[in-house]
Amino acid sequence: MSTSKRVTITDVARQAGVSIKTVSNVINNSGSMRPETRERVRKTITSMGYSVNYSARSLKTGVSKLIGLATFDFTQSFTALFAQSLIEVARERDYGVVINTYDLDGTGLPEAVDRIPSLGADGWIFLSGKPLANEGAILQQQYPIVFVGDFDAYGKADSVRVPSREAMDALVSRLLAKGFRRIGLIGAPEGVDANNVMQASEGAGPLRLRGFVEAFSRLGIPVDWNLVIPESRWLSSDGERAIRDLLGRVACPEIIICLNDALAFGAVHELQRMGLQIPQDVQVIGFDNVQECQFSTPTLSTVDLHMEAFASAAVDMLIGRINGDTGPFQTVTTDFTFVERASTRALR
Amino acid sequence: MSTSKRVTITDVARQAGVSIKTVSNVINNSGSMRPETRERVRKTITSMGYSVNYSARSLKTGVSKLIGLATFDFTQSFTALFAQSLIEVARERDYGVVINTYDLDGTGLPEAVDRIPSLGADGWIFLSGKPLANEGAILQQQYPIVFVGDFDAYGKADSVRVPSREAMDALVSRLLAKGFRRIGLIGAPEGVDANNVMQASEGAGPLRLRGFVEAFSRLGIPVDWNLVIPESRWLSSDGERAIRDLLGRVACPEIIICLNDALAFGAVHELQRMGLQIPQDVQVIGFDNVQECQFSTPTLSTVDLHMEAFASAAVDMLIGRINGDTGPFQTVTTDFTFVERASTRALR
């Protein structure tokens, strides 16, 4: 590669008789200058064959300054929220982000991981939508990895987890302490029930359901399993259907906890369609604190999982490994906060 | 690379005395089988050192079966909607998607493009958030490119555009034909006004504003520029603020068109907070038809820009080029549909 002959932005600025900043503004179609100046700089760029050389840094340092994210698709609002937080945090650290998506229903993470050698990032963040097979063997790779989400990393990589069980336990404990008893839950995992819920050790659904049950158990209050509705996909349409299932069988609970905000939006929609007023007749709370919670009617109370801190922890651990940190693997669990908006009056 | 010695899924199945499908189920933690079987297959996988080999196909054919998407971040709901459509369409064509994000406010697309040589996709889809500098020189690369969005490709690559001007013209023409006159618009680009709107030739904002003005002009009805509110970011918080700006100055319009759904959610929220009823007092319509439109209160009328057809066109053009199509560059403009929901009663 003949990098020594490459035309630089300084060459262009000198030739056009303008500042480097002005050339940069022309390249980015930004800034304010006389149209003739913009045109002259544009012509200079073309005549000199200048092209922006971001990989010069990479050639010099041997690193790409690129972090990889392997994630399932964007049907879940959580994915976009996490990706956006990751992009912002990485940008502050002067890293770009490349995202390799995989099919949650198909071959999944193994397929994404097999493609990683051809994608030149310095390290990868794996967001898994399923438990890891084969005792997390997929985490044993030649490049730095941080594993994020709610699943077990088997001690084979740094990992960052959200406090799913703890947040739900604290939420339900608060509601029970205020005297609420008829509390519904939408989005329970299929196959986890009264018999095996206390064995749940990974997965947002199983852990949140376990936290729910533990809060009741601590006070010796039985869980009403008629109020626990399984929904595995967590889309708004599922929340809508769950409400029909629930209210087709039992009287409306006092409070309905949804395992993500998308489910809650669907639930709120269907409850209102049925003529119920929120929060007067029934209170609704979600998980994630996506942006839309602030603009729905009513605005949505939710559990904020501190997505920026979550992304920061993952990025900082990964950059540490990229820079040669060889210490033992760490697991970080981020914090949570309840955000009370108009869909509840029970959280303060 | 000693691919000939690599342990295959067939070897594992034979050794463990199970079907290939069963091994696949163990790898993916899916399917139903006796726990002992799962454990035995897992042990066989570990002892034989098997790892899933998706890149074998790549080694054989010289292609990665990966499409790249260069896009700005996920603050805009449109980005997630388009990425998700692209992922689904690509998956149907047996391609994966890798996403290289860039900073819309910073060095932008040039930085993303400079990283592309290190990201092993067979071809790239560029989604630009700004006009291309230097007469689209960035589209002249060594790999297949399809350019998508609302900006000019200068004839230097295949491109897919949404019908921003046409859709807005048709929408406003329909409203005017029904007798509505006081129609507001939120999200107008800064710097485009009555003096230069007819010169707008690219960009979703300028083109939609131009379509708005053209519909009025065709009937000889003057546009009331007091009802046109500039907002360049198109987030819900901007929609909220735009309503305060608008109603701080003039009486509420009969209909408010928002240049994307996120703006509309913010507008609806603020209108309701001010005590206005939708659609009785004011009707609101968005653009994009994101999933949340179906679950907001009221549900949101919007312009559907046929995102799946948009993604299909881009993917199919790109795969054609990857497979050696050397014909002249094409521009495809997708179709649109009005979706009437509870926030309007004027669209039928």
Image: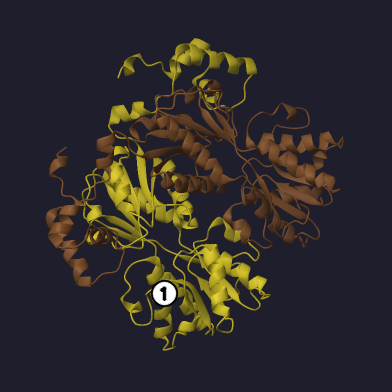
Chain colours: A yellow, B brown
Q: Quadrant of the C terminus of chain A?
A: bottom right
The answer to which of A311 and B199 lies nearer the viewer is B199
> Could you tell me residue B186's position as x and y percent?
71, 45
* Residue at 59% from the left image edge and 45% from the top image edge: B306
Total number of numbered labels? 1
The reply to whether residue B102 is visible in this rendering is no
- Look at 61% across and 62% down and name the residue there: B295
Seen from the viewer's position, the closer of residues B191 and B163 is B163
- Label 1 crowd bin: few (<14), some (14–19), many (20+), radius 10 Å: many
Q: Quadrant of residue B16?
A: bottom left
Mark 1 — on which chain does it sit? A
Location of residue B310 with respect to B345 vertically, above or below: above
Identify the residue at horizontal 51%, vertical 29% (top origin). Answer: B158
Q: Tell me the SS state at disc 1.
A: helix
Work out whether residue B147 or residue B188 is closer to the camera in this orientation and state it.
B147
Amino acid carrying label 1: it is Leu
| Residue A116 in picture, x, y percent from top left | 30, 43
> Can you see residue A159?
yes
Measured as percent of width and height from the top left, residue A161 is found at 36, 61
In this picture, residue A78 sits left or right of residue A291: left
For this view, does B107 lie left or right of residue B229? left
Task: Tell me which residue sits at (57%, 26%) in the image.
Answer: A29
Name the quadrant of the N terminus of chain A. Answer: top left
Q: Nearer the viewer, residue B140 or A1?
A: B140
- Horizontal relation, residue A255 to residue B6: left or right: right
**Would residue A199 be found to the left or right of residue A257 on screen?**
left
Q: Which residue is mark 1?
A: A209
Residue B192 in percent (x, y) is at 71, 32
